[in-house]
Amino acid sequence: MKYCSNCGSALEDSMNFCSSCGASVNTDEAKKAKEQNCLDRLSAGLKHERLCYKIFGIAWTVIASFILILSIFMLIGGSLIAENAVDYSVEYNGSEYYIEDFDVEPDAVASALFIGLGSGYISMALIFLGVGIVNFVLASKVGKYRNTLYKDCTNGANHASSVGSIVLAAFFNEVALIFVIINFVFMKRNAQTFESIKANQKSYNEQL
């Protein structure tokens, strides 16, 4: 005769599950199954998070490149307009040269506008490029955490349970933020299980 570790009900030796509460009789196997499910669930969450960072990294980089090309064309156009923007003549009065009829043509305004917008677009392109680079960096880190999850989940678990990860996602990728929050809540609900997983992995790695 054996007893359920969950509710204390008496069990037959051949029973694998408690007839009263449904708990697994083999607690070790149930614990291992839960730990495996938790690792699989976190792996899937990190995969989705990484994908969001990667997609948006590409998108921001493409947008930055397009704006940068546009700004270069505007700067070149402004420079070409500026060459014909001033109308003046050089005269000589017998003793010295002087400029006469110095007039700023309307093209000068267009030239200044083109150059000003081109300079502004360059600044915008650099900002977008910076956001894209940050997304690529975050995607790389999340990928590394996921790759080592089944050998040592420490980095992945710490990342998923960190408030800093939420802050970064809020600033640089609102879509990834959805998965970051989901992973965060999942980690908080299963903190004890992951502590057990970390201890088991550490013990196993030390034996290698």
Image (spheres, helix red, strand yellow):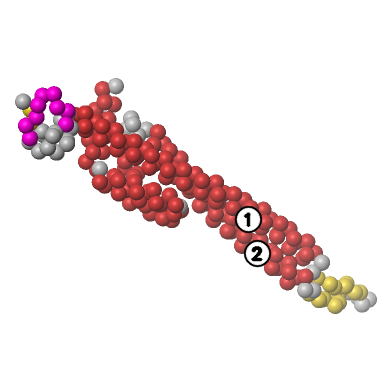
Density class for disc 2 (Cα within 10 Å; few <14, some 14-19, many ≥20) is some
Q: Amino acid at mark 1?
A: Ile
* Foreground of the two, 208 or 2: 2
Is residue 141 among the parts visible in the rendering? no
Please state the horizontal and vertical placement of residue 32, each as a whole percent of the image.
24, 31
Q: In the rendered image of this protein, does residue 91 appear above or below residue 140?
A: below
* Residue at 88% from the left image edge and 72% from the top image edge: 90
Which disc number belongs to residue 67?
1
What secondary structure is found at the residue carrying circle 2? Answer: helix
Q: In the rendered image of this protein, does residue 107 appear above or below residue 188?
A: below
* Residue at 26% from the left image edge and 26% from the top image edge: 204
Tell me whether the residue at label 2 lies in contact with that at label 1, contact meaning CB atoms closer than 8 angstroms: no
Please state which of the two labelled residues, at mark 2 or mark 1, is closer to the viewer.
1
Is residue 203 among the parts visible in the rendering? yes
Left or right of residue 119: residue 51: left
* Number of marks present in the image shown: 2
Q: State the residue position of label 2.
A: 117
Q: Marks 2 and 1, Cα distance to the nearest angstrom?
A: 11 Å
Please state the horizontal and vertical placement of residue 42, each as a whole percent of the image.
34, 40
Question: Is the N terminus in the top left, top right, bottom left or bottom right quadrant?
Answer: top left
* Residue 12 in magenta stretch: yes
N-terminal-most mark, 2 or 1: 1
Which range is magenta?
Answer: 9-17
Q: Amino acid at mark 2?
A: Leu
